[in-house]
Image: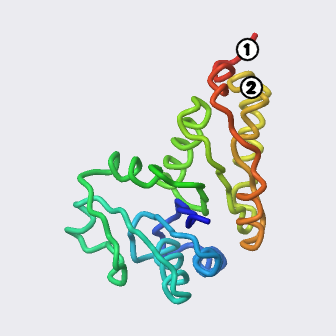
Amino acid sequence: MATMRVCVYCASSEQCDRVYHDAASALGRALAEAGCTIVYGGGATGLMGALANGALEAGGEVIGIIPRFMIEVEWQHPGLANLEVVEDMRERKHRLLTDSDAVIALPGGSGTLEELFEALTLKRLALYFNPIVLLNTNGFYTPLQRFMEQVVAQRFMNREHLAMWSMVERVGDVLPAIRSAPAWSADARRYAAVRG
């Protein structure tokens, strides 16, 4: 069976509660132990660093994709054997998602949320088909889930779009959620627009 390539979106903040860092480290370890290749933003701090460190300590393969300006200010993780330097944030997002078999979103700020929403938008338009899993550490994504249900209720998205992602509470539930995610069909474009 081919190695699963998992794209992980996560924060660079060192200031958030340690529970988030611990979950990121545990996820890195779990993915590495399952033989997954992790693709992430290449940073050394915050949840990014914790994810990479957890995976590397477990002997995992970690690919970092980082824009050139972040190299210039030395934000890259020094322990990565595979660090791809790209020109800008737009190219970074494209490379993170390209060839990924799944997306995992850990808690994060505007950058993490932007990446997550781009993946959701591409899935809605039938340009990305793979599982998207939100790790709801400490209830972080619960308000977002409620908000997205409001988006559907107020007819900005269709009810089917709530199946574009799943949300789990524990690191141990991430891989089962990926494996059990319903297939997303190419005909999703048929209901990408809100129906009357």
Residue 64 locus on image (x, y percent) = 39, 68
- Circle number at residue 195: 1
Mark positioned earlier in the residue sequence (2 or 1)? 2
- Circle number at residue 135: none
Residue 98 in sight in this render: yes
Residue 162 locus on image (x, y percent) = 75, 38
Label 2 close to label 1 by CB (< 8 Å): yes
Amino acid under label 2? Answer: Asn
> Farthest residue in the top direction?
196
Q: Is residue 78 above or below residue 111?
A: below
Mark 1 secondary-structure assignment: loop
Residue that mark 2 sits on = 158
Looking at the rendering, which quadrant does residue 35 occupy?
A: bottom right
State the residue in front, 172 or 111. Answer: 172
Using residue 57 as the reference point, say whether residue 140 is left or right of it. Answer: right
Amino acid under label 1? Answer: Arg
Using residue 139 as the reference point, say whether residue 15 is left or right of it. Answer: left
**Within 10 Å of the Cα at label 1, are there few (<14), some (14-19), or many (20+) other Cα atoms?**
few
Residue 171 locus on image (x, y percent) = 72, 72
Mark 2 secondary-structure assignment: loop
C-alpha span from label 2 to label 1: 7 Å
Quarter of the image where the N terminus is located: bottom right
Q: Residue at x 51, y 68 (%)?
A: 38
Q: Is residue 131 above or below residue 160?
A: below
Looking at the rendering, which quadrant does residue 155 occupy?
A: top right
